[in-house]
Image: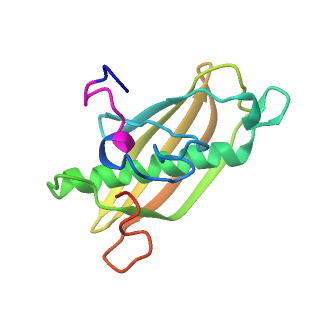
Amino acid sequence: MLGMSMADLGVQQTYAPNSICFGCGPANEQGLRISSHRIDNGLTMEFEPSDFHQAFPGMINGGIIGTLLDCHGNWTAAVALMDHNSLEEPPCTVTASYSVKLRRPTPTGCKLIVTSQILELDGNKVKVELLLEANGKICATGEGLFVAVKEGHPAHHRWN
């Protein structure tokens, strides 16, 4: 990350550099290590799948797609709560529920673009809409409900 400014860093690298989460943890060498960036009312990210992310030749495993959407949506909620409550850092959020619709096979050999939009923010809960595209085509959509957790929850300090 030498030569990168704070603006170049994704929210995961900025706020949770020691996270070991398989999907979004910058400290997990074996994980997906996504890097999400702010857009109006949500986040966006790019992901370049490797051959070992395949379900069958040339196509990405559905579980990998679900993980990309889940972690990206979770961070969308965390950033939304941080902004809404004028906090200096995002609260730790967890997934309450999420659904994924696999609309077409998702190919390897190209960048995947994932975008999220905040649908609803209510107290410590955020509902998020998710979209995954490859080569300009929608491959998967999803929706999730993410909740900020309090002291005492096992995930509360997971980003530290």
Q: Is residue 149 within the magenta segment?
A: no
Q: Is residue 154 above or below residue 79?
A: below
Residue at image position (20%, 54%) is 84
Q: Is residue 57 left or right of residue 110?
A: right
Q: Is residue 42 above or below residue 6?
A: below
- Residue toward you, 101 or 91: 91
Q: Position of residue 28 (x, y in %)?
A: 53, 47
Give the residue at the far bottom of this rendering. 152
Q: Percent from the top left, x then y, of residue 104?
A: 73, 34
13 sits to left or right of 109: left
The quadrant holding residue 6 is top left
Which range is magenta?
5-13
Q: Point out the image quarter for the N terminus.
A: top left
Main secondary structure along the magenta-highlighted residues: loop
**Residue 34, position in %: x, y?**
49, 38
**What residue do we see at 31% from left, 26% from top?**
8
* Placement of 125 over or under 71, stated as above or below: below
- Image quarter where the C terminus lies is bottom left
Q: Farthest residue toward the right?
A: 56
* Residue appearing at x 16%, y 52% in the figure: 88
Rendered image coloring scheme? rainbow
Viewed as shown, does residue 80 lie left or right of 114? left
- Is 79 drawn above or below residue 107 in the view shown? below
Q: Position of residue 91 (x, y in %)?
A: 29, 61
Residue 8: in magenta span: yes
Residue lying at 39% horizontally and 66% vertically, measured from the top left: 147
